[in-house]
Image (cartoon, grey):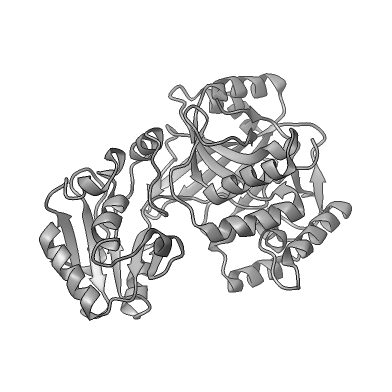
Amino acid sequence: MADVLPFRALRYDLGRDESLDELTAPPYDVIDPEQRAALVERSPHNVVAIDLPAGGADPYAEAARTFGAWQDEGILVRDESPGLWAHTQEYTGPDGQRRKRHGIFARVRVEAYGPGRIRPHERTHPGPKEDRLKLTRATRANLSPIFALYDDPAGSAWRAVEPATAGAPDGETTDPDGTRHLLHRVADPEAISAARDALEGTELLIADGHHRYETARVYADEIGGDGPHRYLLMCLVALQDPGLTIFPTHRLVRGLEPARQEALATTLRAHFEIAEIEPAALRPPDGDGPLQLGYIDAHFKRAFRLTLKDPAAADHLLAPALRRLDTALLEALILKGPLGLTDDAIAHLDGLGYSRTDAEALERVESGEYDAAFFLRSSPVAQVREIAAAGETMPPKSTFFFPKLLTGLLINPLDSD
């Protein structure tokens, strides 16, 4: 079972002149150089300066120097006693619906993946793990949280911490996506004990942050022995939370020379019913039933709906738990079929790209940046859980959990309790 504990958070001193609006940042892996520059311009103390270091002979050493200086100067301060944190996100999703998601910040013991403890749900890319490991070694801290899911049909864990949300928040910010983030510290020992009891027997499913979790395992083993380095910062959200939503990540491909284009066309005609549609309808409606894809290429710029003729067409290529997963079917029948992408090419984005919005995916094809795009449906939360429980992992970017967690709300030091 997962070992969930309160922690002495390191956080911005909001008694100074700066607010969390100026100091927090999106996850490092969605920040481009222009966005990074804008965040640093917003405040020289923005967390991006340490979470996404840039410049210099050794950017990781510079991040560590800056991180230490901010603590010495009182920009970052440490809580005197351990606590949990109730986190509420009020947001409008890509579908236009307004929702509220509830999470609990805690530190969780790093363990090997396995039943009853912690499970991944996606394959990971190698590059980000190396980068995050160097940063962890330099700063000796979790600068951003892992997003994990737990099963709690009765809602007991959130109910234990919810009374702490009745007062004014200990931290509040609205991010560029319009999501309002509220943080309330949970210091009451009885509330902490009740939340821990509710989480004690649950299995945790990593929703976002696989690279950082695997980095934490490597780092913990490098240090050896027991101690705070064996834990990492997580935000835990119940699978039953009404604000938990998943949106799709569309696939973009390039390198469609005539031979591959013809092979692709042959495969599509063989396996799919093909109907021309308006570009606005490229993303298929969510729902059960055979695989449906939206398709458009840069040459003809005509939009099509692809519906798989035989749901069992890829059964011989996939593990049973993956046979009805849209991203796995697309990968098996098309990406690794006529397009010839290998696992290594997919892992290193060689000929493959991703887009989280319909408009961006369409624009990147129509501009000629990519040769074609495949538009996907969302993966149901229940399906994600079933695949993880079967011990399988999805293709990368099979899920887009929205909204993202911000970096800089809370930091978990790894070198002292």
Q: Nearer the viewer, residue 119 or 252?
A: 119
Measuring 35% from the left and 67% from the top, which residue is drawn there? 252
**Residue sitting farthest toward the right:** 72
Percent across and percent down for residue 379 are 33, 46
Q: Nearer the viewer, residue 95 or 310?
A: 310
Q: How many marks?
A: 0
Specify whether 256 is left or right of 369: left
Specify whether 347 is left or right of 280: right
Is residue 84 visible from the viewing direction of this image?
yes
Measuring 49% from the left and 29% from the top, which residue is drawn there? 203
Measuring 38% from the left and 67% from the top, which residue is drawn there? 352
Percent across and percent down for residue 31 are 57, 65
Which quadrant: the N terminus?
Answer: top right
Percent across and percent down for residue 313 are 16, 50
**Is residue 382 shown above or below 333?**
above
Percent across and percent down for residue 372 are 29, 72
Is residue 97 visible from the viewing direction of this image?
no
Q: Quadrant of residue 392?
A: top left
**Is residue 401 shown above or below 333?**
above
Which quadrant: the C terminus?
Answer: top right
Q: Nearer the viewer, residue 326 or 80?
A: 326
